[in-house]
Amino acid sequence: MPIRNMPPQAKNSSYDFRLRDWLLGTQMLFVAFGALVLVPLLTGLDPRVALFTAGAGTLVFQAVTRGKVPIFLASSFAFIAPIIYGIKTWGVPPTLCGLAAAGVFYIIISFLIRWKGSGVLHRLFPPVVTGPVIMVIGLILAPVAVNMALGRAGDGSCVLVESPQALIIAAVSLGASIVVSIKSRGLLRLIPILCGIAAGYLVSIFLGLVDFRPILQAPWLALPDFTFPRWSWKAIVFIVPVAIAPAIEHFGDILAIGSVTGRDYLKDPGIKNTMLGDGLATSLAAFLGGPPNTTYSEVTGAVALIKIYNPAIMTWGAIAAIVVSFVGKLGALLHSIPLPVMGGIMLLLFGAITVVGLNTLVKAGRDLARPRSMVICSLILVCGIGGMSFDIGNFTLSGIGLAGVLGVLLNLVLPGRSESDYSKGFGSDAGINLRKGEVSREDARGDNG
């Protein structure tokens, strides 16, 4: 597109690395921080490793896309359930192997797009598949959220905080997140998770539930607790199907940032390259002990808010994440957050994930009473939530992974497919993120009112 025909915002969206932009980049990390560290805190991974791999992954993404897309990559909520199950079943290193394979899955998709075009992505994963799979992600995690809000361990096996205190803390965290996400304006509206954690943490201090000794004893500078994968076919088979839903999310997020900057990133650098960058970033994160990466829509909202589209701002955000990851006291501070604080936040987040899945079906405009759609949705939901599992040799397929594989297979083999099944819903939730659904397409364009 000639420069003279570009939308005004597209003219100032070229990469320009300048020292004076370091504060803007740090602000982008601040916007992503709450969601970024919440995933490792919930799953038992090191939050400082997650910070490091978010920064490193964003730099890898920028290298692959030639610095053309102003977007930040960090922890994906879609993988919380499989990480928790994987660590409990096989331990951390085998689980990291499965997460690294999820990144390879993205890379394979990127080459498939190069070969067949971006339409192949939606033909394999239409809304009738991805919608219910996203709902399964949220609904499977619902009992974990409730247990933690009540002061119990995620599996409900033991009480860590007495129920009356736990409910007060969870209610404050939940209430603060809701108020900020609904009533606030500007930059504050983009950080409801961080505000909810801060409010719950302050109440926890007042109730005497925070131990500051580990924070005081922690060094100021320390290496993140890097952990490396160990080969496990079982973890790969279990985790890789979970990547189906985030793959569709990626497409939507690229559309969203394109609507903000006025550039068509589906053509330049191309969805094939953005997907490749996402896959490489996810595999890199897993190889170092971090959670999978995904594109962050709240950062897209922040870009729309400040109306500065220079992708180099994300370079500064990535550098800030890497630098902060070496602050030892930060890790101790994050680990001091009481369980009910997280529980209160999770009540909202996992419910929001379920609603995003439901909204995917609604946006697609399909009649779910049609026998074909009903069969696919019903079996994905019941088998995924109900705990159905299949043993294939030494492998077990269950939960979200089973739901994803089952949905894809049913969509391919059941008769009655038509082009209209794929013509709607592709990228329709461009600004809605699998983590929490807090940024709509309108918010991504800067309409926060």
Image: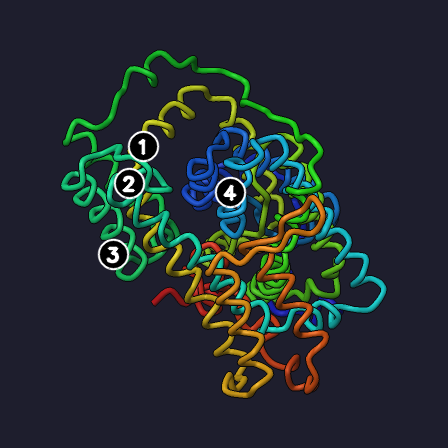
The alpha-carbon separation of the residues under discs 1 and 3 comes to: 21 Å
Residue bearing mark 4: 85
Is tag 4's residue or tag 1's residue first in the polypeptide sequence?
A: 4
Q: Nearer the viewer, mark 4 or mark 1?
A: 4
User: Where is mark 3, residue-wise?
Assistant: 179
What whole-number distance in Å separates the C-alpha atoms at marks 1 and 2?
A: 7 Å
Looking at the image, the residue that sits furthest to the right is: 115
Tell me the kind of residue under disc 1: Ile
- The answer to whether residue 62 of the structure is visible from this angle is no
**What residue sits right under mark 2 in the picture?**
341
Q: Amino acid at mark 2?
A: Val
Kindly report the distance in space between the C-alpha atoms of the residues bearing marks 4 and 1. 22 Å
| Mark 2 vs mark 3: in front | 2
- Across and down, in percent, residue 68 comes to 69, 53
- Residue ID at (66%, 31%): 229
Three-letter amino acid code at the position of disc 3: Val
**How much space separates mark 2 and mark 4, taking CA atoms?**
22 Å
Image location of residue 420, percent across then percent down: 65, 86
Query: Is label 1 in a helix, a strand or a loop?
Result: loop
Q: Residue type at mark 4: give it.
A: Tyr
Secondary structure at numbered mark 3: helix
Tags 1 and 2 touching, CB below 8 Å? yes
User: Residue 338: x and y, percent?
Assistant: 29, 33
Q: Check if mark 4's residue and mark 1's residue have beta carbons within 8 Å.
A: no
Q: In terms of secondary structure, where does tag 4 sit?
A: helix
**Left-right relation of 253 to 334:** right
